Amino acid sequence: MVNGKPNFVTVAHVGIMEMTSISLGMNKSHYTNQGIKENKTFSVNLPSVSMVRETDYCGLVSGKNEDKSVLFTTFYGVLKTAPMIEQCCVNMECELVKVVDFPSHDVFVGRIVEAYCDEQVLSGGAVDVGKVQPLLFVMNDRSYWRVGARVAGAWDVGRELMQ
Amino acid sequence: MVNGKPNFVTVAHVGIMEMTSISLGMNKSHYTNQGIKENKTFSVNLPSVSMVRETDYCGLVSGKNEDKSVLFTTFYGVLKTAPMIEQCCVNMECELVKVVDFPSHDVFVGRIVEAYCDEQVLSGGAVDVGKVQPLLFVMNDRSYWRVGARVAGAWDVGRELMQ
């Protein structure tokens, strides 16, 4: 939320700090940064492969010049100041807990307060990455990629080497 | 490098801070943490799908009890105290720049000092994610997944919406 309007930006530099905290590394020139600093909240919305055009567009134009609030249907959760995107099948609302300063980037660390998803992407009560079809971003070839097949179970397939 | 020996751990909670800095979120109970704090260096080695057993094994057993230095052929770069894995086709050696403290986790932020790769994973001089075949880790279903097909070009496919 920036200057009273929802704004959306495509973020390449993301991270998981621990189970409930995530990070967004955002160049200090971005319009969205001031909104996060003012509200001390932000949302993270996972775009599926079908949303590749809208996702890329949000990274091509700035909220300084274009009203990106008209692109999506928004909804709000418990934090009230973190608009989320109904068209994204996984949404998280976050409370800002820390800003780690880098020369050209603000790294915003947020605690996930609540998460939302479409029922269609659930399998046995958990979000199924195969159904979400999230976009992966690769900087090297400046491209979006999709997630492929499941390979093996974690904390499991390596047991063979335990003898 | 812990207590004079290379040690390797599987890290799920990773992040990109900005172009040259990455993060590792590691539970404070891990054996590797003390080595990173002592040496102020670490390496990041990307395992391919073909290394799923070894990768999972490194997350199942601790360097406190098992000597994991015997699993791989190691090599060293400019930092001298960050052993890297020859069997991984992409390696980065990092200088510790910051430890962000969380209740149960140390988040180690490192600046990438040098990166190495196998020539076979290059396309036009850049690392090709399709050739690397990196393992993706999904916590929800406790599984490893592979990267699928390329979807579209970034800073490009969204131009259609710029009219």
Image (spheres, coloured by chain):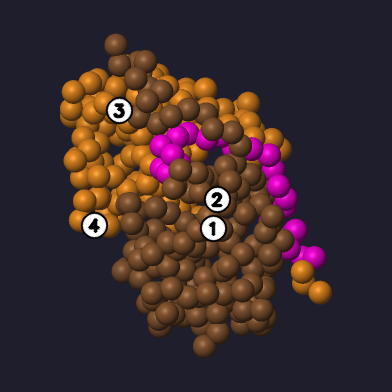
Chain colours: A orange, B brown
Residue interval drawn in magenta: A138-160
Subunit ID for the residue under disc 1 = B
User: Horizontal placement of B136 versus B97: left or right?
Assistant: right
Subunit ID for the residue under disc 4 = A
Separation (CA) of disc 3 from disc 1 = 33 Å
Residues flagged by tags 1 and 4 on a common chain:
no
Residues flagged by tags 2 and 4 on a common chain:
no
**Can residue B143 be seen here?**
yes
Seen at 56% across and 69% down, the residue is: B85
Tell me the number on the disc at residue B110. none
Give the SS element for disc 1. loop
Is there CB contact under 8 Å for labels 2 and 4? no
Which amino acid type is marked by label 3? Leu
Is there CB contact under 8 Å for labels 2 and 1? yes
Residue at the limit of the structure toward the top, as seen here: B163
Tell me the number on the disc at residue B118. 1
- Label 4: which residue? A101
Q: Nearer the viewer, residue A44 or B135?
A: B135
- Label 2: which residue? B121
Is there CB contact under 8 Å for labels 1 and 4? no
- Label 3: which residue? A60
Which amino acid type is marked by label 1? Asp
Is there CB contact under 8 Å for labels 2 and 3? no
x%, y% of residue B128? 51, 45
x%, y% of residue A12? 38, 42
Which amino acid type is marked by label 4? Asp
Seen at 52% across and 74% down, the residue is: B75
User: Horizontal placement of A136 versus B41: left or right?
Assistant: right
Subunit ID for the residue under disc 2 = B
Subunit ID for the residue under disc 3 = A
**Label 1, residues with CA under 10 Å away: few <14, some 14-19, many ≥20:** some
Residues flagged by tags 3 and 1 on a common chain:
no
